[in-house]
Amino acid sequence: MRKMIEFRNVSLTYGKKEIFKSLSFEIFENNFLGIVGPNGSGKTTILRSIMGLIKPSAGVIIKSDRVRFGYCMQRQFIDTLFPFTVFETVLMARTSLIGPLKTPSREDRIEAEKALDVMGIMSLKDTSFHDLSGGQKQRVLLARSLATRPNFLILDEPTTDLDITMKREILELVKNFNVKEKLTMILVTHELNEIINYAQEFMFLDGNIPQKIIHRNELNERMLSEIFKSHIRLKEVEGKKVIF
């Protein structure tokens, strides 16, 4: 299995504040990593460092030359005051490939339409992004992240403020990308219960254990109770893990 990202004794700072010290972990091709932690725990800092937007203050981050990132941002960060259509919102992702001042080509438009089709929202193509429901907006942003044809997908809290049904739909779509399309994935969330049956591996931030990658099969009640500083019960119901 090919290594996509490696952190070797990496320290990350924000301003003068050190957020992480001596982080060491590896992400392999087709892995699905869930990064779990509360607001302010450094989840976004790790994502930005993986994408090369933040340089480590110490250590080294090694990225395979095969990595092509797709980034699905939190929909709350999209300014909906501008009257962009769904198609225009997805097409904007192609500017990272062609440059901000270039006119999208026919190929760019085809890739944007393919992404809309994959997400099942082609019928919304000419609809204003501002007028969509929360679940529809999240599907658009997922399509946007796919428009660059990535092999490494990064999702920043994609289920925030969605109802239970829509959360499940989004996570099933994401899992399908990992299993059927063989995309390497990182999903950031503050709710372990939402992704415990989707991600293969986990990293917990702001806990009582060192930041490291833990496989789903290694999770147990004692470990989770220590991480979350609360008594946790981990049970299996109809083949699914459930946290109480």
Image (spheres, grey):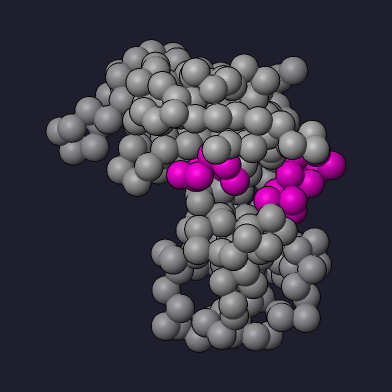
Residue 165 occupies quadrant: bottom right
Q: Please provide percent x and percent y for residue 192.
A: 54, 39
Residue 211 or residue 223, whichever sits in front: 223
Residue at image location 36% in from the left, 28% down from the top = 229
The quadrant of the image that shows the C terminus is top right
Q: Can residue 81 be seen here?
A: yes
Q: Is residue 57 magenta?
A: no
Q: Please provide percent x and percent y for residue 179.
A: 80, 38
Work out whether 181 lies above or below 9.
below
Residue at image location 71% in from the left, 31% down from the top = 236
Q: Is residue 190 magenta?
A: yes
Residue 120 or residue 8, whichever sits in front: 120
Query: What span is in magenta?
Result: 171-194
Residue lying at the far left in this picture: please name it. Answer: 16
The quadrant of the image that shows the N terminus is top right
Q: Please provide percent x and percent y for residue 238.
A: 80, 38
Residue at image location 57% in from the left, 42% down from the top = 193
Q: Can residue 89 be seen here?
A: no
Residue at image location 35% in from the left, 37% down from the top = 42
Residue 23 occupies quadrant: top left
Work out whether 219 lies above or below 83.
above
Residue 157 or residue 93, whichever sits in front: 157
Work out whether 185 lies above or below 169.
above
Q: Please provide percent x and percent y for residue 79.
A: 42, 74
